[in-house]
Amino acid sequence: MSQIVPPASVRTHLRVPLRFADGYATTARVFTFDGLVDGGEHLAIGLGDRAGAFTPNGHKGAPPLVRPHSECLTGDVLGSERCDCGAQMSHAVKHIADAGGYLLYLRQEGRGIGLYAKLDAYALQDAGLDTYEANLALGYAEDERDYTAAAQMLLALGQSRVALLTNNPDKAAQLRRLGVTVTEQVPTGVHLSTANARYLAAKARRGEHTLDLPPGPHETWPTDGAVAQQPYRLS
Ligand SMILES: [Zn+2]
């Protein structure tokens, strides 16, 4: 049974040329919205054939490839190696630009607890808690992210059917409840380094992410930020 989300509408859209640190360049169409339930300044970033002229319901072919990406200032902007967000985002942009679709840039830093609280949680992780235990110790839920605005944005773009680029089953489950048909769940890359190994292990163990990480102690895992090639399983 799907919930009905309040309607939102496209407020503006404009072309923005992108160039990433590794030199990869593409052009995006960036969308802003009116009517998002939480009042956040979330963006939809159209890539590939979705970077062209926008006409609602104008694409009748395969569903767009969509990645809901939660803002991570430390990972996305500063290149922090405590998580894999920056690598996930650039990988997703390339994948979506090839397939045609949208990266939804959602302003819910630190799994929804905010930037300062996330940095407080990092301090607790340095004392031995994992990423979920640290959120709980600070009085937050393990994961406070809500994808209602993401569903509103997709529906405002005329996209009620999407292929979802994620390893996180909660994103697909929430979007389905919110009235978006997820036709396929496409796994994302695993970006493993010595600095984020404990974080990724906690995501796989506690968040039920479909990360097929190498067995054994983390110290034996490959490092140097090497991107494992499709070591995933579909769920
Ligand atoms: Zn991050």
Image: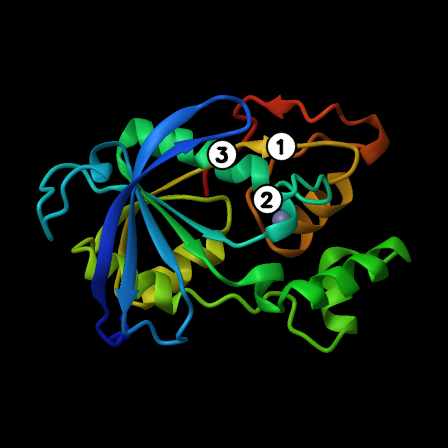
Relative vertical location of residue 2 with respect to residue 12 in this rendering, above or below: below
Q: Residue at x 48, y 58 (%)?
A: 170
Separation (CA) of disc 1 from disc 3? 11 Å
Q: Amino acid at mark 1?
A: His
59 versus 138 height, above or below: above
Q: Of discs 1 and 2, which sits in the foreground?
A: 2
- Give me the C-alpha separation between circle 3 and circle 2: 11 Å
> What residue lies at 62% left-to-right and 67% top-to-bottom?
114
Question: Where residue 128 sits in the image (x, y, percent)?
Answer: 89, 56
Q: Earlier in the sequence, mark 3 or mark 2?
A: 2
Left or right: 56 as drawn, with respect to 195: left
Q: Residue at x 36, y 67 (%)?
A: 149
- In the image, 128 versus 212, the foreground residue is 128
Q: Residue 223 location in percent, x, y?
A: 75, 25
- Asked where in the image residue 81 lies, by quadrant, the reply is top right
Q: Residue furthest right?
A: 127
Q: Is residue 53 left or right of residue 81?
A: left
Q: What residue is rendered at 77% in x and 44% in y? A: 198
**Image coords of residue 197 (percent x, y):** 75, 39
Numbered circle sitting on residue 77? 2
Closer to viewer: mark 3 or mark 2: 2
Callout 3, which amino acid?
Ser
Residue wearing tag 1: 191
Numbered disc 1: secondary structure: strand
The residue tagged 3 is 90
SS at mark 2?
A: helix
Of residue 2 and residue 99, the one placed in the foreground of this image is: 99
